[in-house]
Amino acid sequence: MNLFQNAKFFTTVNHLKDLPDTPAEIAFVGRSNAGKSSAINTLCNHVRLAYVSKTPGRTQHINFFELANGGFMVDLPGYGYAQVPEAVRAHWVKLLGDYLQTRTQLIGLVLIMDARHPLKNLDIQMLDFFALTGRPVHILLSKSDKLSKNEQIKTLAAVKKSLKPFMERQAISVQLFSSLKKQGIEEVENQVQKWFSALATPILE
């Protein structure tokens, strides 16, 4: 089953009280401008499923998409730089944090990092923050096409080495990904499919 291929927009929410009742969901998150929306669009083979902009911080709500297996994909607001009023930014931070810490249906997090600038302070803070849930994280080193083959190999090895202390407390996997070259799609699908398959009651047989 192509998990992401026929993803359909389901709803968007701006407050936790409005979160839909879903069987299980995986969430995508990343620093503003890390390539999150492009990654989602590439995985789903859809040009504008998630909004792509040269202006960081365009995802201002929590957006839900229904997947082929009956589970859900959640597009979370980007963290870090964004030209928005401070009150709006504060709302995002609380919304994002509360969702990640309290959402019982969340079974795993896909964390997007720019392959040229991985493991920035905010990324490490996100790993620390999400570790409290005990749920797995799969890291996409996006925009890997901007690196040479040799640089890609070195970057992946360096990131894996840096993540070793984090891997002692939770399940973390990492891969190279390119929206432009459509590389790494199958690897993401396989990882996320494992999360859904590990549920006590599978969503779809």
Image (cartoon, grey):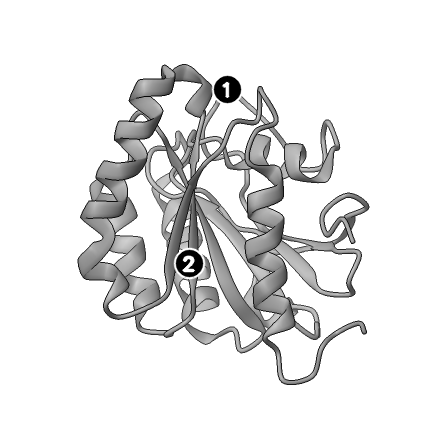
- Foreground residue among 23 and 186: 186
The kind of residue on which mark 1 rests is Lys
Does residue 138 appear to the left or right of 163 in the view shown? right
In the image, farthest residue toward the bottom: 200
11 versus 86 height, above or below: below
Residue at the spot of label 2: 137
Please say if 198 is above or below 114.
below
Does the image show residue 139?
Answer: yes
Identify the residue at image location x=30%, y=57%: 127
Label count reads 2
Q: Are marks 1 and 2 in contact (CB under 8 Å)?
A: no
Q: Position of residue 196 (x, y in %)?
A: 63, 68
- Where is residue 194? Give x, y as percent: 58, 64
The residue at the point 41 percent across, 16 percent down is: 146
Indicate the amino acid at tag 2: Val
Tag nearer the camera, 1 or 2: 2
Judging by the rendered image, the residue that carries numbered circle 1 is: 54
Quadrant of the rendering where the C terminus is positioned: bottom right
| Category of crowding for the residue at label 2, using alpha-carbon neighbours closer than 10 angstroms: few (below 14), some (14–19), many (at least 20) | many
Q: Residue at x 38, y 43 (%)?
A: 79
> Foreground residue, 92 or 189?
189
C-alpha gap between disc 1 and disc 2: 26 Å
**Quarter of image, res 155:** top left
Residue found 75% across the figure and 74% down from its top? 203
